[in-house]
Amino acid sequence: MRRSVRFKSLAAILQFSVAAMAATGCAPHVDLDATVTPPETAPSRTTTSTAKLAPDLSGRTRFGKASFYARRFVGRDMADGVKMNPQGDNAASKTLPLGTTAKITNIENGQSAVVTIEDRGPYVRGRIVDLSPSTARKIGISERNGVAKVKVAPIAVMMPDGSTKDGTAAPDAKP
């Protein structure tokens, strides 16, 4: 008997909630911070993969932390449809357009490598780029240390119309 009373109470609460939402118009919450490209030097406010950030088409240099792609992503399809190759020069960025090439420099040791943005992520607070294991090792990031402070300087930014725009690391870019 007690269970049926609880069930009826929960059903009433649920029905009231649905009616209240209908009365208010069910307007979705708009997170203004998620529609504006945040500065990459500040940690992200969200750690979910559902966040949709505006693409960064500026070509400007960013500073933040790079991480090592997790082993579980090896062989999986990336956002551009290509399988993640641990020996490739692939990387993931939340805001740089897919197809963008960028020079990643480890600030602590000065080592750098050129990557192509082929995936989305990392979805960990404070990180701006995930690197393939091969690329991470080239700039001095190992599975043991896993994360390093880096400079991400776009070379060629892929534009929505398929053209490219020179980034700050392009050979003929002006400072």
Image (cartoon, helix red, strand yellow):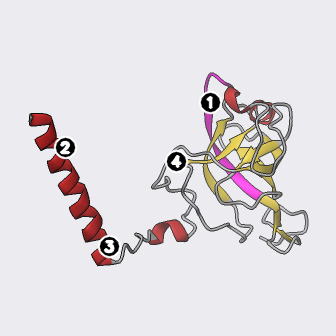
Q: Is mark 2 on a helix, strand or loop?
A: helix
Q: Mark 3 points at which residue?
A: 22
Q: Which of 56 and 42 is in front in this view?
A: 56
- Mark 1 touches mark 2? (CB < 8 Å): no
Q: Which mark is on residue 7? A: 2
Question: Does residue 95 show up magenta in the picture?
Answer: no
**Separation of disc 3 and disc 4 at Cα?**
38 Å
Residue 175, percent across and down? 77, 70
Q: Which mark is on residue 126? A: 4
Q: In which quarter of the image is residue 106?
A: top right
Q: What element carries label 4?
A: loop
Left or right, residue 143 beside residue 35:
right
Q: Which amino acid does label 1 sit on?
A: Gly
Please tell me whether residue 41 is drawn above or below residue 87 in the rendered image: below
The stretch in magenta equals: 143-153
- The disc, 1 or 3, on the residue closer to the chain's N-terminal end is 3
